[in-house]
Image: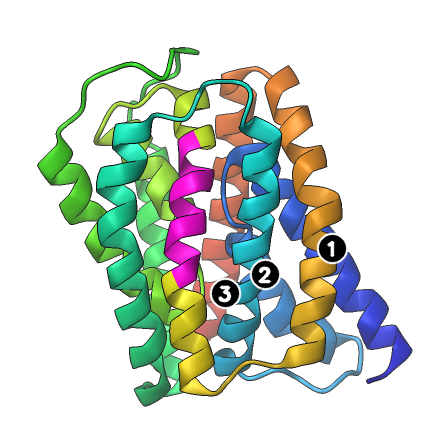
Amino acid sequence: MDVGLIVLLFGIGLVGSMLSGLVGIGGSIIKYPMLMYIPPALGFAAFTAQEVSAISAIQVFFATLAGMFAYRKDRLVNKDLVLYMGATIVLGSFIGGYGSKFLPDAAINMTYAILALAAAAMMMLPKSSEEGSSEFTFNKGLAALLAAVIGIVSGIVGAAGAFITVPVMLVVLKVPTRVAIASSLAITFISSIGSTVGKLMGGHMLLLPSIIMVAASFIAAPVGAVWSKRMHTKTLQWILIILIMATVVKIWLDIIV
């Protein structure tokens, strides 16, 4: 592999993983379009949507693992939320991850575009913004059902679904912002197990690019988590909104034009 491409992939991994720890997402909301568009724009061979989703899947697994360790002492993870959403999202993500082998690249890109658009719409709605504690009540049945759906569609694009899970927790389940960020890393980690296994079985995993992205994850995700603890919850929400909106515009412009 070209040295320039190795450096580029490592840089993409650093940016995505930093955001993973910062706003409680796996980072695929930004890494998917970066992997899809930046290498060919700089003269390198383009990855297919299948390859990008497979690289994203394994990178998200390790980015969220690293992020979880950074949050482990803050007692912001709600165990019931992780249990009910994690149990169904991992099954859904496996189904989506393995089933994606039967889909064309255009279908994968369209799934990603719809998922990002839904996340952007939800982030515009009223949501919980208080700091909160990890102890609160929520609709467990609804949480499990939504997680299963999120798992299937996010597994298709190699995401663990945090960029849609966080808005769902904030808007629908009314989870306090910092609890949503911390808990989503644990839920995303569980989800990424299913999508990673599904992608591996689908046969689209590229070993060296995945290793490069994983190495970046262990460096950047904990740094993002540390920064997150020092930032106001409104600031964290706006960072997530901007990331999602930028991705929505780019993906839909490509599809339409």
Q: Which residue is mark 3?
A: 57
Crowding near pointer 2: few (<14 within 10 Å), some, many (20+)? many
Residue 26: % across, % down:
51, 49
Magenta span includes 55: no
Identified by mark 3, the residue type is: Ala
Q: Which residue is mark 1?
A: 216
SS for dot 1? helix
Question: Would residue 148 be seen by someone viewing this image from the given angle?
Answer: yes
Residue depicted at 43% across the width and 64% down the height: 252
Q: Tell me, for residue 84, which label it has, or none.
A: none
Q: Looking at the image, which is closer to me, 159 or 90?
A: 90
Q: Earlier in the sequence, mark 1 or mark 2?
A: 2
Q: Are marks 1 and 2 in contact (CB under 8 Å)?
A: yes
Magenta residues, start to end:
183-193
Q: Which residue is mark 2?
A: 59
Residue depicted at 41% across the width and 85% down the height: 202
Residue 243: % across, % down:
54, 44
Quarter of the figure with residue 51: bottom right
**Against 222, is 175 above or below?**
above
- How far, Cα to Cα, is label 2 from label 3? 6 Å
- How far, Cα to Cα, is label 1 from label 2? 9 Å
Q: Earlier in the sequence, mark 1 or mark 3?
A: 3
